[in-house]
Amino acid sequence: MIDETKVEQAIKLLLEAIGEDTSREGLLDTPKRISEMAYEVFGGLGKDASEHLSVTFEADSKGIVLEKDITFYSLCEHHLVPFFGKAHIAYVPDGRVVGLSKLARTVETYARRPQIQEQLTNQVADAIMKYLKPKGVMVMIEAEHLCMSMRGVNKPGTKTVTVITRGVFDEDQNLQSSFYNMLK
């Protein structure tokens, strides 16, 4: 899906545009390195979380399943600068559960594309509801955005927090409180 030649050309043009000498030793392989990196950081483009959430297991669990502190890295679609942090996912099963690594893989699927945090939070929750079909889900993402830390307002360490609820979490404040208490 990624056109290596175009990425390399674009990076070379960018380096030239900012006044760099693309023939100097330190930059000779930079366009190729960036092209290779693009496979990794944009690896979620064109992928769907169904591959991770389609294999479920029967479980007679009526309580909350929480996976917290899922680290992720993404790129802000406005500046193509990284944002990174942790995702926390809770769901109430409706007879089926998913392997815990699959929740982390779901976050990765959506984080590895040009993205905004608000959309990432929604995509994770919607995918879990669609494929796992729990009674409800709650997703919280905490992230530092380098577009705020290293440029613009220059406020390193500032965290942005987004939260979304679906299903029973929409209706039940006690479930939401349990989620927050479990994060402590």
Image (spheres, grey):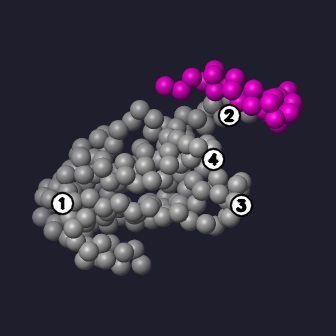
Instruction: Say if mark 3 contacts mark 2, CB within 8 Å.
Output: no
Going from N to C along the chain, the mark reached first, 1 or 2, is 2
Q: Which residue is mark 2?
A: 33
Element assignment for label 3: loop
Q: Residues within 10 Å of mark 2 (few under 14, many from 20)?
A: some
Q: CA distance from mark 3 to mark 1?
A: 41 Å
Left or right of 139? Residue 141 is right
What's under tag 3, amino acid-wise? Asn
Q: Quadrant of residue 139?
A: bottom left
Is 74 rendered above or below residue 92? above
**Residue 37 shows which numbered tag?**
none
Question: Marks 3 and 2: which is nearer the front?
Answer: 3
Q: Identify whether 76 is placed above or below 183.
A: above
Element carrying mark 2:
helix
The residue mark sitting in front, 3 or 1, is: 3
Q: What quarter of the picture does the C terminus occupy?
A: bottom left
Query: Residues at badges 1 and 4 in contact (C-beta under 8 Å)?
Result: no
| Residue 86 is one of the magenta-drawn residues | no
Three-letter amino acid code of the residue under disc 2:
Arg
Q: Position of residue 135 (x, y in %)?
A: 18, 60
Mark 3–mark 4 distance (CA, rounded to whole Å): 13 Å
Q: Mark 2 or 4 closer to N-term?
A: 2
Q: Residues within 10 Å of mark 1 (few under 14, many from 20)?
A: some
The residue depicted at 50 percent of the width and 49 percent of the height is 116
For marks 3 and 4 on the same chain, the one whose residue lies earlier in the sequence? 4
Tell me where the magenta segment starts and ends, as one range. Answer: 1-29
Residue 25 appearing in the image? no
Residue extending farthest front: 153
Q: Which residue is mark 1?
A: 135
The residue where tag 3 is placed is 154
The residue at 71%/54% (across/down) is 151
